[in-house]
Image (cartoon, rainbow, N blue to C red):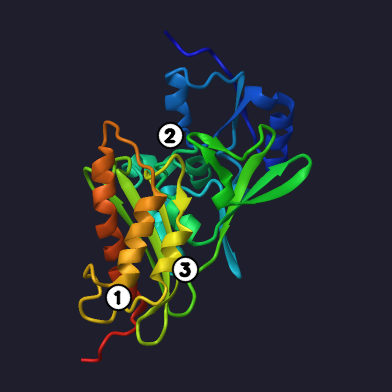
Amino acid sequence: MMAPVAEFRSACSTEEAVTWLAELGADGCVLAGGTDVMMQYARHELGPAAFVHIEGIEELAGVGRDGVVRIGALVTHRRLAEDAALRTSNPALADAAATVGGWQTQSVGTLGGNLCNGSPAADSAPPLLVADATVELQSRAGIRRVPLEEFFLGRRRVDRRPEELLTAVEVEPLGSRQAEVYLKVGRRGAMVVAVVGLAARLSFDARGAIAAARVALCSAAPTPLRVRSVEQALVGLDAALPGWQDATSPSLRDGIDALMHAVSPIGDLRSSEAYRRAVLPGLLARAIEICRARAGVGVPEG
């Protein structure tokens, strides 16, 4: 059975888009790259009266830097993966974007769409969460800002009202003696939904001990999530000491225990719950090692 025919409206400006969204309410659906929306429409999971197409709104397609990094909702995964400045300021996000589907999907799929889709497996979410991201939502009533940590409400449910358009995401760039990474487990390195994904942003002291930590996950709970209990446990771990990855390392052991308590993975066609749990400790340890190497602290001169 064919999907019901929906009206197609192509907005030329943010103001035009939010005017139409206010008029349509719950009967409207924002459309950008369409990599998720059109599949859901074809499967009858969506039945809007009208699509509000925003791909031509140039003001939503830029990346700016003024203390924070401001990424327009229409910035594509390919742009995120290839932007040289972003690979310096927010490399985990660039790495994650490079794993989202094939080059065709990356070329049209957008950051705003990836977030508004509300998938527990969104690759962009963990790197944004460890960068303390805030989403900007615009309507005719004005602008509302929501911490990304509060934006995800459940599977395919986000804190965006029908009359609102996600216009930008603001993130913190890396600071001094900080490093970050996104690691993804899948049947292949790219073009697959994550079996599980983990992002870490770590701050180190001069000798290589973790001074502060941020850790976030996807495909490990009903929503992408930041795991603060793990972050607290990792503070003080000295990744420059030999044997720090051994089970006898209290900080790592406590971090892994906290991780296991925080997650609630499901079993599905991509992976069992047991496998998702089994790979997480190794991902956490690997993320710590990569971050220490990238930060270049506590490394003996040779």
Residue type at numbered disc 2: Thr
* Marks 2 and 1, the one that precedes in the sequence: 2
Mark 2, other Cα within 10 Å: few <14 / some 14–19 / many ≥20: some
Q: Secondary structure at mark 1?
A: helix
Label disc, if present, on residue 89 of the rendered structure: 3
The label on residue 35 is 2
Q: Which residue is mark 1?
A: 293
Picture quadrant of residue 102: top left
Residue 296 showing in the rendered view: yes
Q: Looking at the picture, does residue 47 appear above or below residue 161?
A: above
Crowding at dot 3, Cα within 10 Å, few <14 / some 14-19 / many 20+, comes out as many
Outermost residue toward the top?
1
Direction from residue 95 to residue 56 in the image, left or right:
right
Looking at the rendered structure, the secondary structure element under dot 2 is loop
Q: Picture quarter containing residue 271?
A: top left
Where does the image place residue 208, in percent across and percent down from the top left? 35, 82
Q: Residue at x 28, y 70 (%)?
A: 289
Residue displayed at 32% across by 85% down: 298
- Mark 1: amino acid: Ala
